[in-house]
Amino acid sequence: MELDRGHPAVSVRHGGSASGCCRRWNRDDWRTQRDTLPNDARKAHARALFAGLPRHYDRAGAALSFGQDPRWRAALVDAVRARPGERILDVATGTGMVAAALARRYGAEVVGLDQSPEMLAAAQARRSPGVTLVEGEAERLPFADGEFQHLTFTYLLRYVEDPAATLRELARVVAPGGRIASLEFGVPEREPWHALWRAYVAVGLPAAGRLISREWFDVGRFLSASIPDFYARHPLADLPAMWRAAGIEEVTVRRMSFGAGIVAWGTRARSSG
Ligand SMILES: C[S@@+](CC[C@H](N)C(=O)[O-])C[C@H]1O[C@@H](n2cnc3c(N)ncnc32)[C@H](O)[C@@H]1O
């Protein structure tokens, strides 16, 4: 894989220092970092899953959610309330949709971080003004404490081994008083939406994914288990407590589309939690 050719502006930052230098990505960086990564099953699966998705990602996400996903993203971007020139970290940036929207909407300086070079290559192809891309892991951010004014993350926590620890790491790099906002799939609780949602993710989503590609069929099957499994381990009612334990206060959880989309936001505590 020729990461250094074709995607020249994808950069990597090493170390946790605010003054750590940004530099161009090359193959040796890729090998070095890969060799030192833990090879846990959830992470390995996420890497494999997203390697095949960038091509259709933006349109497929909107189509498979019946046009709801763009509404959820807009609510996420609204929740940040940044000022021009502020620095925002978008973790699990994927193809960079949220990063681009934040930069456009607020005139902010956005860093998009993701562990998938394939997704980052698609983000890079967007050439969004005000957006810099970094390959890295949410569990070990290569940034100093409080380096960003705000932070967003989208569809991330189902892919990490320890969501509470990852949330603490995300909060660490946000300055006191800064906004932290997320978007995640949810499970509608009330009938008939719950039954309809279950039928759609079990049958409709894999079938619709099949029409796009083999990879989207796999995504459809994966999501039908991954979303309920996440909430079985981490009930939505416990989410504000998890955020507070990470040092995030004034937590608001907004259920959208009958609970199929969950937008949450809060403020980085002034004294660390
Ligand atoms: C469903 S995609 C969401 C992409 C994007 N945020 C969006 O707007 O749709 C999930 C992304 O999370 C990334 N990801 C999963 N686990 C990660 C981790 N531990 N650190 C960084 N990125 C991760 C994947 O590579 C993938 O790009």
Image: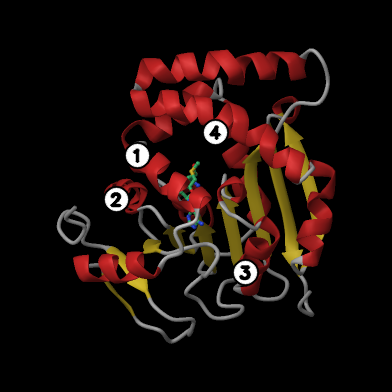
> What whole-number distance in Å separates the C-alpha atoms at marks 3 and 4?
27 Å
Which of the colour schemes (rainbow, by chain, secondary structure, one colour) is used?
A: secondary structure
Q: Which mark is residue 70?
A: 4
- Determine the secondary structure under disc 2: helix
Q: Percent x, y for residue 157?
A: 61, 50
Q: Which mark is residue 169?
A: 3
- Determine the secondary structure under disc 4: helix
Q: Is residue 81 left or right of residue 219?
A: right
Q: Is residue 21 left or right of residue 209?
A: left
- Give, as a three-letter code, the residue at label 1: Pro
> What whole-number distance in Å separates the C-alpha atoms at marks 2 and 1?
8 Å
Question: Quick one: label 2, few (<14), some, or many (20+) residues within 10 Å?
Answer: many
Res. 167 image quadrant: bottom right
Q: Are discs 2 and 1 less than 8 Å apart at CB?
A: yes
- Determine the secondary structure under disc 1: helix
Q: Percent x, y for residue 138?
A: 53, 62
Q: Are discs 3 and 4 less than 8 Å apart at CB?
A: no
- Give, as a three-letter code, the residue at label 2: Ala
Marks 1 and 4: which is nearer the front?
A: 1
Q: Are discs 3 and 1 less than 8 Å apart at CB?
A: no
Q: Which mark is residue 258?
A: none
Marks 4 and 2: which is nearer the front?
A: 2
Res. 65 image quadrant: top right
> What whole-number distance in Å separates the C-alpha atoms at marks 1 and 4?
17 Å
Residue at image location 56% in from the left, 13% down from the top: 203
Mark 2, residue position: 121
Mark 1, residue position: 54
Q: Earlier in the sequence, mark 3 or mark 1?
A: 1
Q: Percent x, y for residue 111?
A: 45, 64
Question: Quick one: label 4, few (<14), some, or many (20+) residues within 10 Å?
Answer: some
Q: Is residue 118 left or right of residue 92?
A: left
